[in-house]
Amino acid sequence: MSANVMGMDGLSFHQFNRGCQLLQGGRVQDQAEAAALIGEAAERSGAAAAQHNLGTVHERGVGVPKNLALAVTWYSKVGPGRYCSPRHPTHFKPSFLELDGIL
């Protein structure tokens, strides 16, 4: 998947992918760096995938303290009609991280 398809510039896309790769590795010591990279991508690009994954990271407390209010804040930035499901408090469907069995 390319940066353009994801709605991210090259740097944001790289940060997002690297963060997801670190989480896939399953090493607890990489979780904080992964959360930071995904967060930077979400803030810089405003891309729905990065924002949603950042919400999931905060919801589950992966690499950051668990914070449901912050999770809802990031989920709500994704926008209506995107990532919908009753699984999350704001009715968003599972993130890429959840679908891949990472979180």
Image: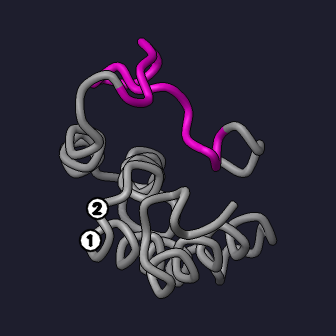
Q: Residue 54, how many percent across, how many down?
A: 40, 57
Q: Secondary structure at mark 2?
A: loop
Q: Residue furthest front?
A: 4
Q: CA distance from mark 2 to mark 1?
A: 6 Å
Residue 43, numbered circle: 1
Which segment did they paint magenta? 82-98
Q: Please tell me the numbered disc located at residue 46.
A: 2
Residue 45 lies within the magenta run: no
Callout 1 amino acid:
Glu
Most common secondary structure along the magenta stretch:
loop
Q: Toward the viewer: 62 or 83?
A: 83
Say how the picture is coloured: one colour
Image location (x, y in percent) of residue 83 = 44, 29
Location of residue 53 with respect to 65 vertically, above or below:
above
Secondary structure found at label 1 = helix
Left or right of residue 45: residue 94: right
Q: Is residue 98 left or right of residue 88?
A: right
